[in-house]
Structures are given as structure tokens and as C-alpha cells.
Amino acid sequence: MVYGSVESLTGNATWFVKSTDGGATFQKLPVSLTVNIDAEGIGFVNDSIGFIDGYGIAMYKTVDGGNSWSVVQPNNRTNRFFVLPSGIAYASGSTVGSINPEQQEFQLKLIHIKMLTKC
């Protein structure tokens, strides 16, 4: 499967794209038809469980391959997902966290980090 987030600067909807043929064709599917989360990142730990987030409202999770989504973390601002072959995933943005597919609830546990800058 191939997935992509679709960022929209206007309107009140959030979409993603999904390919089941290696990227030859894509299907555009809704995350929310009423909320624009300014989607910037999407990540799936397997064909069923995935997360989408951006610079906005909340992180959403699906457990059915993207057919339905629910809010799991409000005001997260996560924009990158990296999934290891083992299925463990890392998410980053204003915070860093990990997703372990072996947990029953598949919740993202955030690890708050302090960014250091050199003057």
C-alpha cells in the first residue's frame, strides 16, 4: 500500500490518498469532511492502522485502512512519520513520539524534547 496526505489551505475538509497497486493509481478518501487539520504527514504501521496529523487541530487514527478516522491527540502538530519494518513507528513535529503496534490501544505516547540551538 502507498499513502499520502493532502494539504489544503482552504475549505473545511481533510483528505488522504491511498494506492493498492504500488502507486499506479490513487484513490482520494476523506479523513474529515468538516475539519481541515492542515495535514502534513501520514504514517501506517500496517495495512489497517494509520495516523495523520499536521499543523493544526489534532492527530487522527484509523484502524480500518482509512475508511474511518478518530481523534487521538489534540493540538499535536506532528508532520513526519517513519515506520520501521518491525511496525514500530516514530512521529515528530513539535514533539517526538513512538507508536508500537503490539499495544492493544495503539496510542501515540509523546516524548517532549527541548530543542537546542547554537548561537
Image (tube, rainbow, N blue to C red):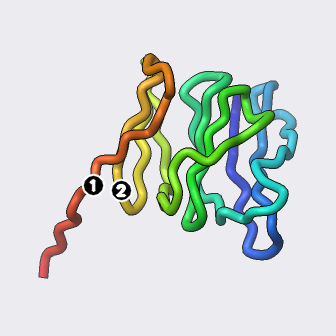
Quadrant showing the C terminus:
bottom left
Quadrant showing the N terminus:
top right
- Which residue sits furthest bottom? 119
- Residue 17 sits in which quadrant? top right
Q: Position of residue 33 (x, y in %)?
A: 84, 57
Mark 2 / mark 1, whichever is N-terminal: 2
**Amino acid on which disc 1 is placed:** His
Disc number placed over residue 112 in the picture, else none: 1
Q: Secondary structure at mark 1?
A: loop
Judged left or right of residue 58, residue 1 is right
Mark 2 vs 1: CB contact within 8 A: yes
Marks 2 and 1, how far apart at CA: 5 Å
Judged left or right of residue 59, residue 18 is right
Q: Position of residue 106 (x, y in %)?
A: 49, 28
Residue annotated with mark 2: 95
> Which residue is rendered at x = 72% and y = 65% of the image?
36
Judged left or right of residue 86, residue 23 is right
Q: Is residue 1 above or below residue 25?
A: above
> Which residue is rendered at x = 69% and y = 39% of the image?
3
Q: Is residue 20 above or below residue 9?
A: above
How many dots with numbers? 2
Q: Secondary structure at mark 2?
A: loop
Q: Position of residue 38 (x, y in %)?
A: 65, 65
**Amino acid on which disc 2 is placed:** Thr
